[in-house]
Structure formats: C-alpha cells, structure tokens
Image (cartoon, helix red, strand yellow):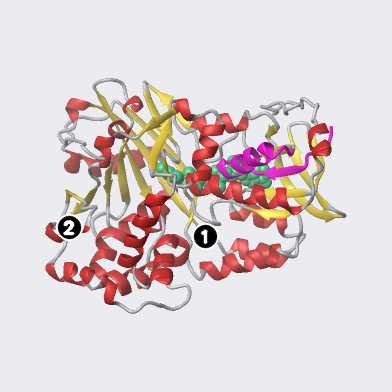
C-alpha cells in the first residue's frame, strides 16, 4: 500500500469536501472514518415512504466554489430546489400562536409582531456608533445595534434554532460573522446591507437553497465515491505523531492496528476527538480544543395525513423563542419545501429539541422526545390525529455552541497550527456549521495544501492504493 499525499481523519461533510477538492487537484487522498459509513452527522433515511434527514436537510448557498463543487461533482441533475412557495413564509411562535415573520423592513414596520418602540429602535440603527468590545456576545451585539426586541423575537430563536446555542453566551463574531463584518466595514448594518445588495448584483453566484433527490445523503455518498479518494470506514484514528517531513497516524481498524505516513493530515473530527488526537503533539492546542462545548439536539420526524393538519403549512416552518418554548427550538415543514419527502396526501414535520436551551433532552428516551414534540405541535398546527410515522434522531455532539471568547480561541488554534507544518484542523467548530461553509472551508484547506509545496505532477499521478481491505468503499483513481 502506498502512502497517500493527504490523510483525512473524519469522513463527515468537512472531510469529504476537502478530499474532493484535493482529488481535483490531482493529489491522492485517503479518508479514515471511525463509523460504518461516510457522511458523519448527515444521513438521509427512507421510512414508510417518508425521507428524513438526521442533520442537515438543505444547503443555502451563495458561494461560487460551492456551486462549482455541485456542478463539477455531477450533482446538478440530482439537485432539488426548495419550492418557491415555501420561501414566502417563515413563522415565529408568538403569544402561543404562529405569526408570519416579516422578511423586509417595510413589512416589519407594519407587523403586529413588533411594538412601536421596537420599530423606532430598529430605525435608529444607522445612527448608532460602531464598535463593541472584542468577543461581544450575540445578545450584546444585537441589543447594541438593533435593540432588545429584535434580539428576543428574531435573533434568539435563530441562534437557538440554527446553532443550538444561547445568544447570551455565544460570540457574535463566530455566530454572526457576516453581521459583525458589516458593522466593521460599513459602520452600520443598514449601510452594509445596502452596499452588499449592490455588490451582490455584480457577482455571478445568486442565492440558491436546495437539497438532492434522495436527500443530503446523495451529496456525501457522491463525494465519497469520487475517483482519487479512498474512504476507509471503521478506521478510528487514535495516534498522531510528528515525524520528518510529515505525520504518522495510527488507527484501530477491522483488520487490526494500522499506521500510515502522510505529509499532510487534516483532522476533520469534532473538537473533543481532535483534542485527543493532537494532545501528544501539542497539549496547548488540545486544551484549546477541549474548551469547545457542544449542544445536544434531538430531531423528531412526524409523518401525518394532510387532512390531520389544519394549518396551511404555507412556508418553511417556524422558530420558537425561549420565552415561548422551553424545549422545542423549531419545526420545519419538510414536505412543503421538498415534496418528495412524504407520500402523496401526507406531510412530514421535523422538530428540533434541546440545544443550550434544554440540555436535559440528552437523557430522554425516544418516546418522551416524540411525545413532547407532538404535544407542542398539536395546538400550533391544529393537528387532530396521531402521526402515522415517527422517527427520532439524536446527536450528543450536535453543534459547537461558539460560547465564550470564541474568536480568541480560534486565533489561539490558528497560532498553534503555525508550529505544525502539514497538520490541519477543519470541522464545524471553525468557520461555520452550515454545509455551505463546510464545503467552502474544504476548498480553502485543500488550496492551502496544494499551494504548500511543489507537488510534482508525475508524483501525483503515480500514486495508487491497491490494497482492497474491507471497509474500503471507494477505489482510488488510477491515472
Ligand atoms: C440537527 C441538525 C440539523 C442541521 N441542519 C442543517 C441544515 O439544514 N443545513 C446546513 O447547512 N447545516 C445543517 N446542520 C449542520 C451540519 O449538518 C453540520 O455542521 C455538518 O454536517 C458537520 O460536518 P463535519 O464534517 O464538520 O462533522 P461530522 O459530521 O461530525 O463528521 C465528523 C466525522 O469524524 C468522525 N470521527 C470522529 N472521531 C474520529 C476518529 N478518531 N477517527 C476517524 N474518524 C473520526 C466521525 O465519525 C464523523 O463521521 C445541521 C446539524 C444538525 C446537528
């Protein structure tokens, strides 16, 4: 067996994206994945005619490199666009009922969701001086710029629903990087949004929200099958040591212990596993990683007959502020967004429970989780029958919460990595949790490696990995 140019530890979307860009750059790549299949948190499951998503259910993209990956990976024909009808409405739980969330300033000004005082405070935003303290929390940043009401009614449920985090503790720079950048660059969010609108008109990539036929599993399965990438499942890396010109990595595998040398290693695991791996080489780096806290999230999918749900379900779903719901952070109307998610005449509703708001859900059994979700949905969506399909997925390490002085932690990690040529850390605790950000960061780390040293093209092309051990799910590209 030849050593690959690059070894990637962790076969989630981050590891697979980096592998895809590296293989495209003609380097040989091996991915060691501890689990039985590639994809990490992302997994699509068919059950009783419904298609459910364990984690990410769609990609919201505006980055050209992500559009390029989808196109070049041959995934364009498999893309399923979110229905335009579903873009029309996003709901918010307010005073125990669902209210359409205004998406434009003019609509917000006449919305009964906001008080007159809240509206006036919002209008004052361009006149607020810029500059909060370093590593401000989301709550501090939003209250300073937009007022308390926007925080409580819009941003808190958004942070809880998409990051499973608590805005009182989450770093604004890490959780809302685009908003904080607007303030830094333009002095106000309103000025920044206006400037960006003009600039975006000039860029080639428009915003696109999509999934794939067969769900998000299609994306990870396709990337894992790319020629030039060898994915070895059941390979749990547990040792990482510096050696001359590269790194030695050891893993427990179905065939026993395995050790491999690579000039570049990308550790694409959640932070606790990355900390365990790098501890021998750099305990300070391991400490920085150990300090990253994760939220537990439970996902409850409910399939119902359309007639059992009184609500029109004319949107993407709803978010629930903490003052309205102690457990449920949101509910997505999957079958409205992507009609192939439920059989004809049925609907699929997916609820998210837990996060920083309700860590106790980690200890609840599936029955209790399902009961809590359906109990919460019944009055809101006017549900008059029991679901015919229920499925519960749970993640103990769902999402990094970006709590504390997160930017300083990230700077510390970047500084430590400068001491370790050939070692790269990349997963959703760095640079955004979304699939879009993961695909884009995979591109960035691959470019860094491709530019790091001269990779003679002859050397690249000769590499093959003929060993066909069990757990190999994709044969390498043979040039
Ligand atoms: C409930 C939920 C809903 C979401 N919805 C969306 C959405 O709609 N849209 C969106 O854009 N994003 C969404 N996300 C976010 C997105 O799904 C994740 O951020 C992303 O999938 C994480 O990918 P990753 O590769 O960084 O990590 P992971 O998926 O965690 O992959 C890491 C991999 O490393 C492996 N590993 C760990 N230790 C080792 C080891 N020692 N050796 C070898 N392998 C190891 C693990 O087995 C795992 O496969 C959602 C997340 C959750 C939890």
Location of residue 394 (image quadrant): top left
The N terminus lies in which quarter of the figure?
A: top right
Residue at 23% in and 68% down? 122
Residue 273 rendering spot, x and y as whole percentages: 64, 52
Q: Nearer the viewer, residue 7 or 131?
A: 131
Q: Give the residue number, with chain letter if any, for mark 2.
A: 106
Q: Is residue 448 visible?
A: yes
Q: Position of residue 241 (x, y in %)?
A: 80, 54
Q: Which residues are magenta?
A: 1-27
Q: Earlier in the sequence, mark 2 or mark 1?
A: 2
Image quarter where the C terminus lies is top right
Relative vertical location of residue 83 with respect to residue 268 in this rendering, above or below: above
- Left or right: residue 288 compared with residue 197: right
Disc 1 C-beta below 8 A from ligand 1: no
- Marks 2 and 1 in Cβ contact (< 8 Å): no
Residue highlighted by disc 1: 293
Q: Residue at x 49, y 39 (%)?
A: 67
- Say which element carries label 2: helix
**Does the magenta-highlighted stretch encompass residue 468?**
no
Residue sitting nearer the eye, 347 or 3:
3
Farthest-out residue, front: 202
Where residue 300 appears, x then y in whole percent?
36, 38
Question: In the image, is residue 3 part of the stretch drawn in magenta?
Answer: yes
Q: Residue at x 20, y 53 (%)?
A: 102
Disc 2 C-beta below 8 A from ligand 1: no
Q: Is residue 210 left or right of residue 330?
A: right
Secondary structure under the numbered disc 1 in the rendered image? loop
């Amino acid at each position: 067996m030849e050593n690959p140019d690059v070894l990637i530890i962790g076969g989630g979307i981050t590891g697979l994206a980096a592998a895809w860009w590296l293989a495209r750059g003609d380097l040989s790549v091996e991915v060691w994945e501890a689990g039985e299949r590639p994809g990490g948190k992302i997994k699509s499951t068919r059950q009783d005619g419904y298609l459910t998503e364990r984690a990410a259910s769609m990609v919201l993209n505006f980055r050209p490199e992500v559009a390029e990956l989808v196109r070049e990976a041959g995934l364009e024909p498999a893309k399923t666009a979110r229905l335009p009808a579903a873009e029309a409405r996003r709901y918010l739980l307010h005073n125990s009922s669902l209210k359409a969330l205004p998406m434009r300033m003019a609509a917000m000004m006449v919305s009964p969701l906001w008080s007159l005082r809240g509206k006036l405070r919002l209008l004052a935003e361009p006149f607020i001086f810029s500059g909060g303290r370093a590593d401000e929390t989301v709550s501090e940043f939003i209250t300073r710029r937009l007022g308390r009401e926007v925080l409580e009614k819009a941003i808190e449920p958004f942070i809880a629903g998409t990051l499973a985090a608590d805005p009182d503790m989450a770093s604004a720079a890490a959780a809302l990087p685009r908003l904080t950048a607007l303030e830094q660059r333009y002095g106000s969010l309103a000025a920044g949004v206006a400037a960006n609108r003009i600039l975006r008109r000039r860029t080639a990539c428009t915003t696109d929200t999509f999934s794939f036929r067969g769900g998000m599993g299609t994306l990870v399965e396709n990337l894992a099958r790319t020629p030039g990438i060898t994915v070895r499942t059941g390979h749990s890396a547990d040792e990482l040591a510096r050696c001359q010109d590269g790194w030695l990595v050891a893993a427990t595998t179905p065939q026993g212990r395995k050790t491999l040398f690579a000039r570049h290693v990308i550790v694409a695991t959640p932070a606790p596993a990355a900390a365990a791996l790098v501890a021998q080489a750099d305990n300070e780096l391991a400490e920085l990683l150990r300090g990253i806290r994760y939220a537990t999230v439970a996902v409850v999918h409910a399939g119902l007959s359309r007639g059992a749900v009184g609500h029109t379900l004319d949107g993407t779903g709803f978010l629930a502020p903490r003052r309205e719901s102690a457990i449920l952070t949101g509910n997505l109307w999957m079958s409205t967004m992507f009609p192939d998610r439920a059989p004809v005449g049925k609907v699929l509703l997916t609820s998210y429970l837990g996060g920083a708001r309700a860590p106790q859900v980690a200890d609840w059994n599936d029955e209790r989780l399902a009961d809590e979700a359906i109990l919460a949905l019944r009055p809101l969506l006017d549900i008059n029958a029991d679901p015919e399909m229920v499925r519960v997925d749970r993640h103990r390490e769902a999402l990094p919460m970006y709590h504390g002085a997160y930017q300083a932690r990230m700077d510390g990690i970047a500084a430590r990595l400068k001491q370790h040529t050939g070692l790269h850390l990349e997963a959703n605790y760095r640079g955004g949790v979304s699939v879009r950000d993961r695909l884009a960061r995979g591109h960035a780390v691959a470019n860094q490696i491709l530019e790091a040293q001269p990779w003679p093209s002859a050397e690249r092309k000769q590499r093959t990995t003929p060993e066909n051990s069990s757990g190999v799910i994709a044969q390498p590209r043979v040039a």
